[in-house]
Image (cartoon, rainbow, N blue to C red):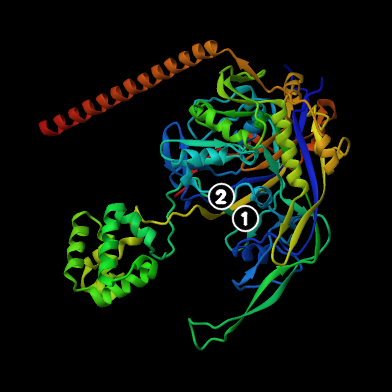
Amino acid sequence: MKTAKSILIRANLKGYGIVNYDGGDQKFTFNALARNQEKSRFDNVTYAKRQWTSMGEDGKCDYKIIISGDCLKHELFKEDVAFQSPNIMHHKSLLLNNIASPAMLLRGYLFATKDQTIKRSGAITLTDAIQTCNAMSSLETFSRSGEKITDENQSDTSFFKKETIGDISYRTRGAIDLMQLQFLSTDQTFDRLGLDPDLFEEYVKILSTRMNVDAKLGYYKIKDSVIDIPEYGVLFSNENVVDLTKLFLKKLLKFSLKKSKAFADVIDVEYKIVYDPLTDRLNDENGWTKLTTDSLDALTFEVNDFYVPVDYDEAQVVRKEMDENLKAVKAANKVAKEDKAAVKAKLKAEKENNNESK
Amino acid sequence: MEKNKYLFLEFENAGFFRDISRSKDFVFDLNGQIKRMDSIQYVEPITVNQISNALHVLMGERPVPSLRATQMHRIEDIFEIASNGYLKNDTVKEINKKNNTSRYPEQTLTMRKAVYNSFSTAPTIINWDRVRRLLENELNDKFHLLLNELFGINVRITYTCEDAMVLLRKYHSGNSKLKEFITILKNVGKVPMVDYINGAQKPTPSELAKDPNAVGKLATFNSNSRTLITTNFGVDKITKLHGKIIVAVSEADLEKIRNNKGVAKLLDGGLLWIDKVVDEDEMTDSMLSEYVKISSISTQTKKAKQ
């Protein structure tokens, strides 16, 4: 039976105006690189985010307006994670309420204190949405009026410039990492501790209020991996991974980014289930399926088993050996360090003796 | 096994933080926590280590940090494949004709901070809640009882903290009970509150010139760890890179790739995917034009903060 390894996605967006602006420092890059464009030496100019392409011999470039992948991700999940504060690391319930959610399983997270770091890589990768039409942006002049209190000799009206554009279309591509979705590490060894294993029961209890959870805590190892170390973690069922995938695709299908004077909406989404990474490729036009609300409901696939369970006792033996070896290495390092310090002290003492005898 | 196939990979959006010398972030590894600005970083944005990690993921192995200490070790066979591969970076570089240098264009990015002790440098108002945090419950209750007695009303619901302090200084500064309370505050080390009640201001340069110790009279409320406002947002600059990679692989390597997910991340949030597989016989020199051998890319590191 064919099993899904990952899901490739591509989406087209249509909108009006600029929805993702860049920082003020862009003026230097813009003035240096932009071809056939009005330049400005002033600071009160707001530039759009862009990707520079095809540099000519004159050192000037064309560009495409973009919506950054980070902006897309933020908008996709902002209803689920309204506010992110690292202070929740100091409150167990708040922390669990935050991380035990489908959005955090998809998006990933990182919370750190001096004592503990918990992190999970996001299962979603989205590239910048790059302009696909030939619309040209321009620096439009705006005015703002309001009483100035800093300098009474200055006019109360000020002018500023902002990059604007009319109708615009974009395209973004990405992938859903099913291997990442399938597993949540509770193990420090692999530098990806995503949950304190002692909190597993509470984690599942909270997650169950948000989705049907079928997850098992235990030792697992990556199938066919050369590194044969069992990793303690949570393995989610096939149904859970499919549900999470569908949740993300639904969010993407309904994506709508609204700003005060601009917007960008997803108009169509296509996906490709990767059964064989060498044939089901992102650049290949074959095998893409258009996503609709109906087809999303009917979407189902069998997820590849990336992880295989390891017997608890067997895993304990391996981990115990690892810990002992690690202790031995640390002890040897300590001895070597002490020896080095003793030699250094001896040399210093000899040097001092020599100096005294002189 | 003979590496008789060439795997063509493409990547887009590979994020690289070029300047971390002013970063307030931290790096965590087996050796504990260090400031990111005290850590080291590669001079080149993409080196053999990053490509090796992407190949690790394509072949179903875990990526291994090359600059942070972990218990994991890289798989040398995969590192070798990356080392013998080729890279073409298609990202446009901005050339500075004045000093003949070049750099990749950057985007400004809003960041969520992972560590909570990033203090807000903006001046912030002092309110009843911050006073409570400084004084803690028992002393705070005493303070409110005193204020209610002096003003004859429930001060907390009548005035803002700032307004109440202005009135307190104006009409009750000589009150013996207030002086007594200030002595208690001094004895338990709540100097920021004493400064605040007395209206201590930041000394002017001329005052400092007369008395260097005037620094001690600073209103310390905004620098006390108990009452500091922390911020969890920041901005940083990121460079987004895109390009292509070619690596020579064997049939066994391809089989490993076939059994795994076919996509990987490169640097920060970059998407790396398989473009095509070409037989050794079909490879021509022109296919490798504009590519650089990955082993020739410098893996030199530099201290983030020079």
The kind of residue tagged 2 is Arg
Q: Which residue lies under the disc numbered 1?
A: B106
Q: Is residue B304 above or below residue B78?
A: below
Query: Is the N terminus of chain B in the top left, top right, bottom left or bottom right quadrant?
Result: top right
Q: Please tell me which residue lies in front, A113 or B12.
A: A113
Q: Please tell me which residue lies in front, B205 or B123.
A: B123
**Is tag 2's residue or tag 1's residue first in the polypeptide sequence?**
2
Q: Residue at x 38, y 70 (%)?
A: B158
Q: Which residue lies under the disc numbered 2?
A: B18
- The x, y position of residue A357, in whole percent, is 10, 31
Residue B48, visible in the rendered structure: no
Q: Is residue B32 above or below residue B124?
A: above
- The x, y position of residue B136, in whole percent, is 31, 53
- The x, y position of residue A185, in whole percent, is 57, 28
Residue B198 shown left or right of residue A90 in the figure: left
Q: Quadrant of residue B10?
A: top right
Q: Is disc 2 in contact with disc 1, using a CB cutoff of under 8 Å?
A: yes
Q: Please tell me which residue lies in front, B139 or A258.
A: B139
Q: Residues within 10 Å of mark 2 (few under 14, many from 20)?
A: some
* Residue A172 - label: none
The kind of residue tagged 1 is Glu
Q: Quadrant of residue B259?
A: top right
Residue B229 shown left or right of residue B245 in the figure: left
CA distance for labels 2 and 1: 9 Å
